[in-house]
């Protein structure tokens, strides 16, 4: 058969077949006119090379398997040399995994150090083998999804109240004095410090977990949000200002946090809250305030680590 037919039947390219020949893995007969003539055995060998490639064994190391077929064995790995090649491939992968694991550990250590460099709170101790990446910066894969209970349906079109809140830069902010244009105000339950400060059963409360990843998202997308038409971005929770200041410093936030420990915004606007561990906390939502009026409300918010991108998409789709 011609090279094109061999390539088609083996599921490889003509260029690949030529490469196999250059390595001496395929040795087709030659016709009187000089053309190569491939047989069924060549098809089987080419298929085996392709199958081994899917396992991560490069073409150059398939000869023991092909030789096993050529001498008449039913399977390419019926020979001792083939098994030895399996072991070598496994050892090589293990070495690569070990190297990547070491690199990951180094990156995690650098991240852990950087996350606390500007913090007034020392890094918490970790048990041997504990991975900080499973903590406050990451989200468990099985978080419960919050349901839309209609608690924010009344907000669009509502005037923001005359409410003064303390910001992390020491200033007092009047919500009805945010100025012209759009302001992104994301409201969240509470941010935890690495390894501490999360109430018992926090992961099981729909919409509770994820305040730090959400905040990091607004940090990372901050310039894009401004370019998309936001005049400013604020985070808001019922935690006190000193606690929030530590978060701003540790995470390097380019925007201010607002503290509402008396839940004034909940009373005046009817924002949804929930109770846990003796605390009354805001449910996660985001308000787009335009010229003193709530233009849009995101509720419920999920997943929190992708929410800043959702807000950015909305701003771009709804230019002023």
Image (spheres, rainbow, N blue to C red):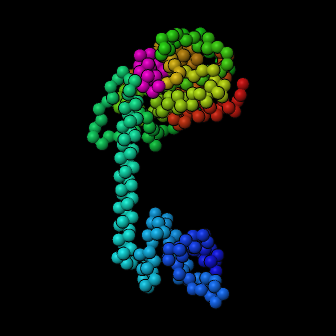
Q: What residue is rendered at 36% in x and 57% in y?
A: 94
Q: What residue is rendered at 36% in x and 43% in y?
A: 105
Is residue 52 shown above or below 314? below
Q: Nearer the viewer, residue 24 or 118?
A: 24
Is residue 52 shown above or below 282? below
Q: Nearer the viewer, residue 117 or 130?
A: 117
Please state the total of marks drawn on the protein image: 0
Please indicate whether residue 240 sits to the left or right of residue 130 in the image: right
Q: Nearer the viewer, residue 168 or 149?
A: 168
Q: Is residue 112 magenta?
A: no
Q: What residue is rendered at 62% in x and 25% in y?
A: 226
Residue 66 percent coordinates (x, y):
45, 77
Give the magenta-colored segment's residue range: 237-252
Q: Nearer the viewer, residue 201 or 166?
A: 166
Residue 28 percent coordinates (x, y):
56, 82
Q: Answer yes or no: is residue 248 visible.
A: yes
Q: Give the quarter of the image for residue 218.
A: top right
Image quarter of the N terminus: bottom right
């Amino acid at each position: 058969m011609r090279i094109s037919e061999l390539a088609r039947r083996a599921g490889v390219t003509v260029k690949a077949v030529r490469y196999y020949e250059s390595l001496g893995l395929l040795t087709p007969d030659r016709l009187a006119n000089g053309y190569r003539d491939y047989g069924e055995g060549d098809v089987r060998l080419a298929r085996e090379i392709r199958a081994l490639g899917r396992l991560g064994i490069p073409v150059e190391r398939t000869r023991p398997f092909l030789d096993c077929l050529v001498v008449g064995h039913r399977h390419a790995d019926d020979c001792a040399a083939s098994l030895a090649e399996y072991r070598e491939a496994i050892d090589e992968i293990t070495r690569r995994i070990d190297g990547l694991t070491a690199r990951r550990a180094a990156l995690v250590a650098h991240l852990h150090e950087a996350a606390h460099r500007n913090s007034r709170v020392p890094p918490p101790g970790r048990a041997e083998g504990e991975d900080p990446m499973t903590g406050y910066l990451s989200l468990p894969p099985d978080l419960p999804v919050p349901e839309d209970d209609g608690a924010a349906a009344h907000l669009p079109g509502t005037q923001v109240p005359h409410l003064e809140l303390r910001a992390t830069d020491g200033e007092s902010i009047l919500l009805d004095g945010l100025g012209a244009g759009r302001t992104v105000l994301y409201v969240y339950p509470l941010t935890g410090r690495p390894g501490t400060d999360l109430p018992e059963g926090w992961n099981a409360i729909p919409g509770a977990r994820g305040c730090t990843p959400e905040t990091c998202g607004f940090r990372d997308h901050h310039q894009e949000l401004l370019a998309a038409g936001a005049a400013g971005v604020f985070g808001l929770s019922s935690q006190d200002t000193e606690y929030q200041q530590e978060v701003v410093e540790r995470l390097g936030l380019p925007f201010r946090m607002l503290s509402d420990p008396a839940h004034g915004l909940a009373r005046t606007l009817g924002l949804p809250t929930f109770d846990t561990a003796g605390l009354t906390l805001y449910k996660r939502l985001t308000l787009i305030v335009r010229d003193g009026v709530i233009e849009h409300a995101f509720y419920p918010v999920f997943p929190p680590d992708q929410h800043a991108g959702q807000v950015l998409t909305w701003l771009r789709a709804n230019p002023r």
